[in-house]
Image (cartoon, grey):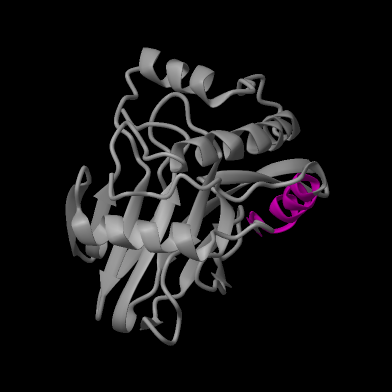
């Protein structure tokens, strides 16, 4: 698919995962210490240009935004698939720790293939990982991808274009809704190749009376000029 390089995707050390966990607990997102290299970034760009094996969904409404999503389908190209498996392996303990904080008994399996099998048995077979292509005046509305019985509480996003050179505007934005409080907006500055882990829908926050759940959504603000290409990796499938 698009000739993605067979070179290894960036790896993450155990001590780096601890730092990622701390950032996620504190703010609901974390930049990974190993960004995508130029070769992998350019390969993803070529895949978007070729469109081979990708399912295109056009966005054209205020509710969804404007632009296009390019879905990979069930089989991610190698080594993107192996990288996603590695990321899940590092994020599953964090997801289980969050469930523990919220008093949720469910535990995520250590390996992605077992979690994917749980999805399949629950009728969740629609892959959600995709590229996001936004041109001038396009934007991605606030949204979550948390449908289905088996939802992984974390996902990964990456920027594949150079801010200020390939595009202007197009900031990655998140909102966090806490009980009885106004939504808190967060703008996450990203450079080309940066990779971030974000909460899929909710995360635990320690309060005066113990942990409580906050709701998160994410979006991309309007692109003022040029073309912005991003990547979203999801670990669960949709029904």
Query: In the rendering, at what x and y percent does residue 230 appear?
Result: 39, 62
Q: In which quarter of the image is residue 212?
A: top right
Against 178, residue 92 (above or below) is above
Picture residue at 40% right of the left edge, 68% below the top = 220
Q: Quadrant of residue 106?
A: top right
Query: In the rendering, at what x and y percent does residue 208 appear?
Result: 83, 49
Picture residue at 75% right of the left edge, 34% below the top = 101
Against 179, residue 1 (above or below) is above
Of 175 and 24, the residue lying toward us: 24
Picture residue at 41% right of the left edge, 86% below the top = 165
Count numbered badges in the picture. 0
* Residue 17 is inside the magenta segment: yes
For residue 110, side relative to residue 124 (left or right): right
Query: In the rendering, at what x and y percent does residue 35 appear?
Result: 59, 60
For residue 164, side relative to residue 187 (left or right): left
Q: In which quarter of the image is the C terminus?
A: top left
Q: Give the range drawn in magenta.
A: 16-30
Q: In which quarter of the image is the N terminus?
A: top left
Against 171, residue 147 (above or below) is above
Residue 78 in sight here: yes
């Amino acid at each position: 698919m698009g000739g993605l390089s067979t070179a290894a995707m960036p790896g993450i050390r155990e001590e780096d995962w601890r730092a990622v966990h701390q950032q996620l607990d504190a703010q609901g997102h974390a930049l990974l210490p190993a960004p995508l290299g130029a070769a992998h970034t350019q390969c993803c760009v070529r895949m978007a240009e070729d469109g081979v094996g990708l399912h295109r969904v056009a966005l054209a409404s205020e509710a969804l935004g404007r632009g296009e999503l390019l879905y990979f389908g069930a089989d991610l190209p190698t080594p993107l698939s192996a990288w996603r498996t590695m990321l899940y392996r590092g994020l599953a303990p964090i997801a289980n720790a969050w469930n523990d904080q919220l008093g949720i008994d469910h535990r995520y399996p250590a390996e992605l293939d077992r979690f994917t099998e749980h999805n399949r048995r629950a009728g969740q077979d629609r892959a959600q990982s995709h590229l996001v292509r936004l041109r001038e005046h396009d934007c991605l509305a606030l949204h979550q991808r948390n449908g289905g019985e088996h939802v992984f509480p974390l996902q990964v996003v990456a920027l594949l274009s150079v801010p200020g050179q390939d595009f202007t505007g197009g900031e990655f934005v998140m909102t966090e809704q806490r009980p009885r409080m106004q939504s808190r907006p967060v703008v996450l500055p990203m450079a080309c190749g940066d990779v971030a882990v974000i909460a899929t829908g909710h995360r635990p926050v320690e309060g005066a009376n113990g942990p409580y759940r906050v709701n998160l959504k994410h979006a991309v603000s309007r692109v003022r000029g040029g073309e912005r290409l991003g990547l979203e990796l999801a670990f669960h499938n949709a029904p």
